[in-house]
């Protein structure tokens, strides 16, 4: 019985460890992202998404952002910034975050496209845009990195 408890504990610890290893370090504050980008001389990848209603956004997350391959490539090249616009009450963002996301959308996504990926230099100037594409994580990384 004790062995089963220990085994279960190790499995749980392993799951949390690997989630942390694979989790993309997403920023949600533009000023913080700019500071990090300026310190590292990396570009910012700003992602506008509807995480609980936009099918292409969900596919982009599953196929690209959540892939270990993209995360390994991006970690030394980009500061990842997410502007999420969920619709379900259970996923409602704090008012302050909603206001920040709306401000980002007014400046960088005035047409309201979802998903919409904007590559910015460390000062916040637009270098290029992308949307959902059926591509490998490496191909998508290369596209963003080419801007």
Image (spheres, rainbow, N blue to C red):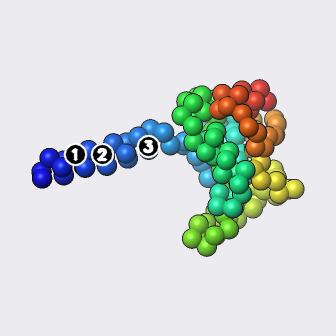
Few, some or many residues within 10 Å of mark 1 (<14, 14–19, 20+): few
The answer to whether 79 is drawn above or below residue 82 in the figure is above
Q: Are marks 2 and 1 in contact (CB under 8 Å)?
A: yes
Quarter of the C terminus within the rendering:
top right
Which residue position is annotated with label 3? Answer: 20
At x 22%, y 45%, the residue is: 7
The answer to whether 70 is drawn above or below residue 32 in the figure is above
Which of 30 and 50 lies nearest the eye of the viewer? 50
**For discs 2 and 3, the disc positioned in front in the rendered view:** 2
User: Disc 2 to disc 3, how far (Cα)?
Assistant: 14 Å
Which of 106 and 4 lies nearest the eye of the viewer? 4
Please tell me in which quadrant of the rendered image residue 83 appears.
Answer: bottom right
Q: Position of residue 49 (x, y in %)?
A: 70, 54
| 37 left or right of 124 in image | left
Label 3 vs 1, first from the N-terminus = 1
Which residue position is annotated with label 1? Answer: 7
| 7 left or right of 117 in image | left
Q: Position of residue 17 (x, y in %)?
A: 37, 42
* SS state under label 1: helix
At x 18%, y 52%, the residue is: 5
At x 77%, y 48%, the residue is: 116
- Do we see residue 82 in this rendering? yes
- Do we see residue 141 in this rendering? no
* SS state under label 2: helix
User: Disc 3 to disc 1, how far (Cα)?
Assistant: 20 Å
The answer to whether 14 is drawn above or below residue 101 in the figure is above
Please tell me in which quadrant of the rendered image residue 97 appears.
Answer: bottom right
Which residue position is annotated with label 2? Answer: 11
């Amino acid at each position: 019985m004790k062995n089963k408890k220990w085994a279960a504990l190790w499995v749980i610890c392993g799951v949390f460890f690997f989630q942390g290893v694979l989790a993309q370090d997403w920023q949600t504050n533009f000023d913080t992202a700019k500071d990090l980008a300026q310190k590292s001389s990396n570009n910012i990848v700003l992602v506008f998404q509807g995480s609980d209603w936009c099918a292409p956004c969900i596919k982009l997350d599953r196929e690209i952002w959540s892939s270990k391959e993209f995360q390994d490539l991006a970690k030394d090249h980009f500061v990842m910034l997410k502007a999420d616009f969920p619709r379900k009450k259970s996923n409602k963002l704090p008012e302050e975050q909603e206001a920040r996301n709306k401000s980002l959308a007014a400046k960088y996504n005035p047409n309201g496209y979802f998903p919409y990926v904007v590559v910015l230099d460390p000062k916040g100037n637009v270098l290029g845009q992308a949307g959902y594409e059926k591509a490998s994580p490496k191909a998508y990384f290369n596209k963003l990195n080419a801007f």
